[in-house]
Image (cartoon, rainbow, N blue to C red):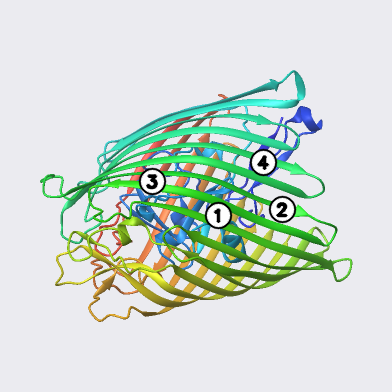
Amino acid sequence: MTRMVVIAASSLLAGVGLPSHSAPDSAQNIEKIVIESAATANDKPVGTFNSPVSNLEYDPRVDLQSRNMAEAQADVTIRGGIFENTGFRVGSATLYDPQTGHYFAEIPVAPEMISSPVVMTGVDNALYGMNSSVGTISYGWRPVRDGGSVSIGAGNNAFHLQRLHSATTWQSLGSSDWQLGLEGEVSHSQSDGSIDNGDHDFQRATGRVQLLSAHSQTDMFVGYQDKFYGWPNMYTPFNVNETESLQTQLFMLNHQQEYGTDSNVEVTAYYRNNKDHYVFSREDPDSFAAFHETDVSAIAMAGHHQLNAPLAVNYSAQLMADRIRSTTLENLFTSRDYYTISVVPEYTFSLDHQQQLAVRLGAKFDDTNRDDSRLSMISDIHWQQALPGNASRSAYLSYTEATQVAGYTAVGGNTTSGLFRSNNQLQREVSKNLETGMAVDLPGWRVDAAIFYRWDNELTDWTYRFDATSARTANPVDIKTLGLEFIGVKRLQNVDLVASYTYLNKSENYRAQDIDASFYALNYPPHRATLGAVWFITDALEVQIDNEWRKQEKNRLRNSSDTAFFTQVTITYTAPTIAGLSIVVAADNLWNERFEEIPGTPGRARQLSATLTYAW
């Protein structure tokens, strides 16, 4: 039987790369342990059920800007980019929404089925990402494990939650070398919202069938979620109570295969349908409403092929086609085909018995049937030294290029009027990233640091003019970003700690004078720090706490302070006399901050909840 160990803070940087899979106990005659890392102390939200983007707002590697809450509408940014610069990858394929990057994170998958998120930047993003010029958040499919849980929860603001998850496995094909798994989940939550007109009603249903062996894993997945949520000034600064309804379907087939010596390949195919109904004013729904429906079909492949002892080839490719049906798009630009392929040879040689040097140098080709193509360079050099006691230290230098094209809302709507004004002159965005970093990994603690300089050309931003009738307008901007990242993790006797600090500095050129404020490209924290801790008080009592402090860049649309301090705390009591029973009491935004994560959009208020769970 495979046993999964999930470490909270102390294994934050336990490894980066393609998610791995493990075989059933019967196939290898041993219990195989897969260690996953998490960048936050808390792994579940307070005001709804868990989703792939939950708690990313406390992740030191990303900046999440939400409307209502992360699980309602999440703009996930990496290293000072904007929401459309971040891709979401499941298996070997990047999931996509052609309308707008606001819906990239609509991924109807139960978190039990996928790994903790791996944040890919630099070479890994350029190699494995698609249409994501700054970073990619990647998830892998976990092996199915026997067990399940049922949860009920309640909290302030009339919040209530119900959830059921179950999974079972058995030997398949008449052989102990194969395992068949079946897993399903249903979840529902509802609330009046942490502020007036911030209500939500979410439901999700997911299921998958898995065939697992010692060297392969095949998953067939289907998921559906239905979401309604409201929020004042959700997308506009006109002091109205906006609402949004989303229905998302996802069908995915994924296969992982190990072969030869240190070689593997993963193939993913998916179909995604997303329906969006946006209402400008819930009090006057006929004043303006928009309907969109998008379809995306894709097939992708990624892998690592070992040619001989020092030489290997890393590769990735994806073909994707989309279309949109919309009440706001006014031209014939309603479908597009995308093609991308990356090939990056890797040469590794030993300097001595403890040191090795790896060099990667390759290229990526991106094209669509409507945009210019682009050939981009991918390169890095990585040094690593093994130290006594299973410790190590390493350093690297990299230069990468990545590109993307704008979504339909930015490029395909009305260019002279309307609530959201498009720009049909937008070009392919090009991002160039020069970076160096180091890591020291010693027993009980680890430190990672990086400094980067990024050139973003033709980046699509959404801007505002105080004398305009449109809520926002798509405009290109050239931006240079200098960034510094520091992350440290420490394991004490009964406490795990993770701390981080990031610094960002930007210089921008919009090539226009009629811009008063930026909603995204210039909405970033020059200074941001996080501190997370997991305190194991007793075998039955555990406290998890995440803290984030930020100093945000000034913005003429922001009505709140430019500084904020957020805290999420969870207390878990596991009943020692009733196996599987636990009670969780949690609070998010403990200090009731009203910081506007998106300028002009009210921030979330304090949320409290208590959840009773029985697991088997």
Q: Give the residue type that dot 4 points to.
A: Gln
Q: Amino acid at mark 1?
A: Ala
Point out the tag, 2 or 4, that comes first from the N-terminus: 4
- Secondary structure under badge 3? loop
Res. 117 in view: no
Earlier in the chain: of badge 4 and badge 3, it is 3
Disc sitting over residue 71 in the figure: 3
Q: Indicate which label's residue lies in the foreground, 2 or 3.
A: 2
Give the CA distance from mark 2 to mark 3: 34 Å
Mark seen at residue 100: none
Q: Is 223 in front, or is 55?
A: 223
Label 4 neighbour load within 10 Å: few <14, some 14-19, many 20+: many
Q: Looking at the picture, which amino acid does disc 3 mark?
A: Glu
Q: Which element type, helix, strand or loop, lies under badge 4? A: strand
Alpha-carbon distance for marks 4 and 1?
A: 25 Å
Q: Which residue is mark 4?
A: 256
Q: Position of residue 605 (x, y in %)?
A: 29, 52
